[in-house]
Image (cartoon, grey):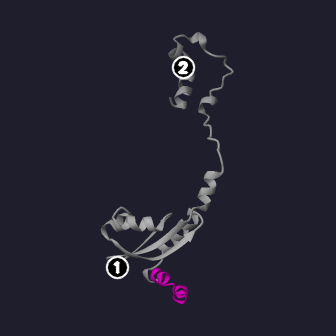
Amino acid sequence: MVKWYHTALWRRGSWFESRSGSASTRPSASLSTSYYAEEKQPERTSDASESKAETKMWYIYILECKDGKLYTGITDNLERRFEEHSTKKGGHYTKCNAPIKILYSEHFANVFDAAKREKQIKGWTRKKKLALGKENLVLRTQL
């Protein structure tokens, strides 16, 4: 039963009548209704799950598709994700436009930095993305 429902029944006075059949078994008035509204947070069991998340590498990648357009994405396993795109199980765009190759990839220690970089690259022009793929530092700084 949902906790707020308990509180609503308590306030109406029908909680204990519906549970035991009589109001005489009602506990003392010192029982706070806020007990039912409180949410208890789960306790952390160990730091093992945190250490796994910290050691997991995240990647951003740029794919070149058959139609000549570029697709930018993020993943934790680059080879698996490219295979998903190739077998049309990946992103919506690559289901219709199969990827040819990975033009560029970059790795990060956490998902937040990778997502931030992905958003930055998605805002770039095609010319700048291609320069990143060719690793042309001079052209990239001029754009």
- Magenta highlight range: 128-143
* Along the line of sight, the residue nearer the viewer: 20 or 91: 91
* Mark 1 residue type: Gly
Circle 2 residue: 15
Q: Alpha-carbon neighbours of circle 1 within 10 Å: few (<14), some, or many (≥20)?
A: few
* SS at mark 2 in the image: helix
Circle 1 residue: 68
Task: Give me the disc on residue 25.
Answer: none
Q: Main secondary structure of the magenta part?
A: helix
* Along the line of sight, the residue nearer the viewer: 130 or 12: 130
Foreground mark, 2 or 1, reads 1
Residue 65, position as x, y percentages in the image: 36, 75
Give above or below for 11 relative to 51. Answer: above
* Mark 2 residue type: Trp
Residue 26, position as x, y percentages in the image: 61, 15
* Along the line of sight, the residue nearer the viewer: 29 or 43: 43
CA gap, disc 2 and disc 1: 67 Å
